[in-house]
């Protein structure tokens, strides 16, 4: 299941980069006729090389900024990240085109492309978020701690398929075993506080795994992601002041 999950998420990421590049190409090459003052002419393979550079730059910056972390971050968080990246990519591309033409090129194509891409990002991210959740494409989940009796193996939670339920009350003696078990899955739902909870959360955050709680905690900040069967499941974004990002922390307390 993990391989299937990675396959689908990679496909979603590649499709998005390709479509964003196509929007750029439309406004750069097709959206305007040639001969406009300040609009450089690229012939032969030159335009395809520039498109390739644009796609590679977009994909790398998206990956480095965490803009492809579907279901790991809220859709709104991903949209903001992708907006910021696209603005940066388009500014760099505008400078690249200007350097190639040896003068400032027309600003209108890049401006229109940026606006169109912003609209596309909102639509695509929301659609991908719903698709991943509906088809359980986020991966597999481990449910641990007492209180998970209401959940069943095979059920879906926030796009994850519940693969194992461990209702044991763990102690620090079990922490290594618990880490090894958590490493087999893409997300962990902690149903009840015990002495291993804080360490398990930190472990999951370090491993970039989704980690959920069934209630708020003053030490942990997160966002309400799922409300099912009378329970409120919280996606943990971080622990402590030094590990958190300002916008995630503000969003957590506003939800």
Image (cartoon, rainbow, N blue to C red):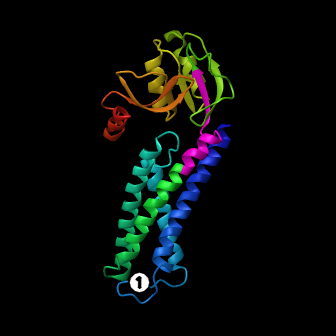
Q: How many numbered callouts?
A: 1
In this rendering, does residue 95 appear at all? yes
Q: Is 15 a magenta residue?
A: no
Q: Position of residue 20 (x, y in %)?
A: 50, 63
Q: Quadrant of the C terminus?
A: top left
* Front position in the image: 115 or 198: 115
Q: Residue furthest front?
A: 230
User: Where in the figure is residue 19, as x and y percent of width and height?
Assistant: 55, 63
In the rendered image, which residue does mark 1 sit on? 40
Q: Quadrant of residue 96?
A: bottom left
Residue displayed at 58% across by 28% down = 183
Residue 54 to residue 109: above or below: above
Within the image, what quadrant is residue 86 found in? bottom left
Mark 1 Cα within 10 Å, few/some/many (few <14, many 20+)?
Answer: many
Coordinates of residue 156 in the picture (x, y in percent): 63, 32
Helix, strand or loop for disc 1:
loop
Q: Quadrant of residue 15?
A: bottom right
| Residue 163 vertical placement versus 25 (above, below) | above
Viewer-proximal residue, 178 or 194?
194
Q: Quadrant of the N terminus?
A: top right
Image location of residue 248, percent across then percent down: 36, 38
Is-magenta flag for residue 141?
Answer: yes
User: Which residues, given as a range, are shown in magenta?
Assistant: 127-143
């Amino acid at each position: 299941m993990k391989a299937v999950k990675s396959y689908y998420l990679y496909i979603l990421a590649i499709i998005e980069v390709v479509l964003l590049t196509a929007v750029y190409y439309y406004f750069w090459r097709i959206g305007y006729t040639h001969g406009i003052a300040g609009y450089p002419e690229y012939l032969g393979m030159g335009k395809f090389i520039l498109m390739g550079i644009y796609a590679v730059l977009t994909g790398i910056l998206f990956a480095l900024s965490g803009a492809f972390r579907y279901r790991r971050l809220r859709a709104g968080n991903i949209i903001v990240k992708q907006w910021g990246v696209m603005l940066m990519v388009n500014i760099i591309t505008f400078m690249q085109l200007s350097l190639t033409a040896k003068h400032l090129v027309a600003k209108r194509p890049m401006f229109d492309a940026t606006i169109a891409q912003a609209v596309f990002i909102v639509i695509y991210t929301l659609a991908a978020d719903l698709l991943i959740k509906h088809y359980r494409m986020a991966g597999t989940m481990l449910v641990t701690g007492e209180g998970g009796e209401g959940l069943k193996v095979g059920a879906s939670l926030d796009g994850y398929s519940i693969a194992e339920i461990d209702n044991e009350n763990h102690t620090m003696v079990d922490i290594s075993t618990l880490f090894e078990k958590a490493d087999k899955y893409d997300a962990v739902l902690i149903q009840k506080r015990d002495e291993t909870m804080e360490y398990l959360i930190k472990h999951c955050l370090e491993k970039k795994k989704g980690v959920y709680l069934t209630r708020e905690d003053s030490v942990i900040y997160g966002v309400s992601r799922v409300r099912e069967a009378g329970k409120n499941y919280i996606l943990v974004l971080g622990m402590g002041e030094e590990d958190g990002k300002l916008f995630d922390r503000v969003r957590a307390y506003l939800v």
